[in-house]
Image: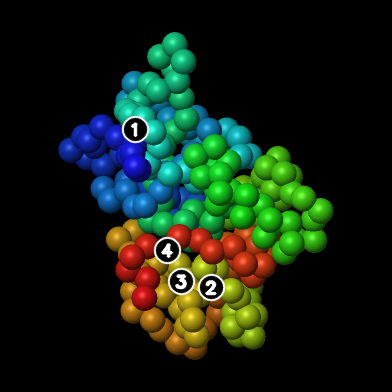
């Protein structure tokens, strides 16, 4: 029987804990399918973010269903009344992967092992462990990478595997089938042809794109056709 991690209701104003594919964190009411974290980046007294956007290289995506555990979102969930990790929320796993997160080995072990296998195969690694994947992803995430975005040619865009996110004109689009779907916090738009994008840049980390190409199947939001 699946149990559900219960989060206390939001206050009237949404908390700033919803992540988009670019890795930015916004205040949006809808939570999506997954939670996750980048360490402790909130003040539990005010339930607001600090000036930091991560405190660890281990950015993970977790299940909201885990042994009936109950958390006070952005509250004091750590030992001795401390903050504990900051709960972030994602539309789906496609979004979380684009932002640079990976499946959690604790609450999503089956998915995490499948991701590690595909990550190793796609990136020519013998057997990638969590710290090695985290180090690689930290160099490639939009929020933590020191290099600029990777521009894509039309051919390169067409060669991306399903679940890869690209950016065009400040918006995020996800490759699926023969076209793309426009991303939003509430779900995906109708399928569009690749030609609508024009110039675009890669959003999903290259190493994660390689894992998708090597067979990892992320969880999509129900609005994806």
Location of residue 157 by image quarter: bottom right
Task: Please state the horizontal and vertical placement of residue 213, each as a whole percent of the image.
Answer: 64, 70
Crowding around mark 1 (Cα neighbors within 10 Å: few <14, some 14 to 19, many 20+) is few
Q: Is residue 141 visible?
A: no
Image coords of residue 176 (percent x, y): 48, 76
**Dot 3, crowdedness within 10 Å: few (<14), some or many (≥20)?**
many
Mark 1 lies on a secondary structure that is loop
Q: Are marks 2 and 3 in contact (CB under 8 Å)?
A: no
Q: Are marks 1 and 2 in contact (CB under 8 Å)?
A: no
Q: Earlier in the sequence, mark 2 or mark 4?
A: 2
* The N terminus lies in quadrant: top left
User: Which mark sits nearer the N-terminus, 1 or 4?
Assistant: 1
Q: Which residue is mark 2?
A: 162
Q: Which residue is mark 1?
A: 68
Residue sitting at 39 percent across and 67 percent down? 183
Q: Gap between marks 2 and 4, in whole Å?
A: 11 Å
Near-viewer residue (180 or 2): 2
Q: Name the residue at 38% across, 56% down.
A: 91
How far apart in space, not on screen, are marks 2 and 3 (Cα)? Answer: 11 Å
Residue in view at x 34 percent, y 32 percent: 68
Distance from the alpha carbon under mark 1 to that under mark 2: 33 Å
Instruction: Give the SS element for disc 2.
Output: loop
Q: Which residue is mark 3?
A: 173
Q: Which residue is mark 4?
A: 220
Taking the image as shown, residue 12 lies to the left or right of residue 53, namely left
Is any atom of residue 157 visible in this view? yes
State which tag comes first along the sequence, 3 or 1: 1
Instruction: Give the foreground label among 1 and 4.
Output: 1
Q: In the displayed structure, does residue 135 sit left or right of residue 38?
A: right
* N-terminal label among 2 and 3: 2
Q: Earlier in the sequence, mark 1 or mark 2?
A: 1
């Amino acid at each position: 029987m699946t149990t559900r991690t219960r989060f206390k209701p939001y206050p009237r104003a949404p908390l700033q804990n919803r992540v988009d594919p670019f890795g930015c964190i916004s205040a949006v009411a809808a939570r999506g399918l997954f939670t996750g974290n980048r360490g402790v980046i909130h003040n539990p007294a005010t339930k607001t973010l600090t000036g930091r956007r991560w405190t660890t290289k281990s950015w993970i995506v977790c299940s909201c269903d885990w042994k009936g555990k109950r958390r006070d979102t952005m509250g004091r969930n750590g030992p001795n009344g401390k903050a504990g990790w900051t709960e972030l929320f994602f539309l789906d796993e496609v979004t979380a992967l684009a932002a640079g997160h990976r499946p959690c080995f604790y609450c999503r072990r089956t998915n995490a092992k499948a991701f590690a296998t595909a990550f190793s195969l796609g990136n020519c690694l013998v057997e990638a462990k969590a710290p090695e994947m985290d180090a690689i992803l930290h160099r490639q995430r939009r929020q933590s990478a020191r290099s600029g975005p990777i521009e894509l040619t039309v051919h390169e865009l067409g060669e991306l595997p399903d679940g890869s996110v690209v950016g065009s004109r400040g918006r995020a689009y996800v490759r699926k089938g023969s076209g793309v779907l426009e991303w939003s916090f509430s779900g995906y738009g109708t399928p569009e042809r690749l030609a609508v994008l024009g110039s675009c840049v890669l959003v999903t980390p290259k190493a994660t794109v390689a894992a998708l190409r090597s067979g990892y199947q992320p969880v999509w939001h129900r609005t994806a056709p």
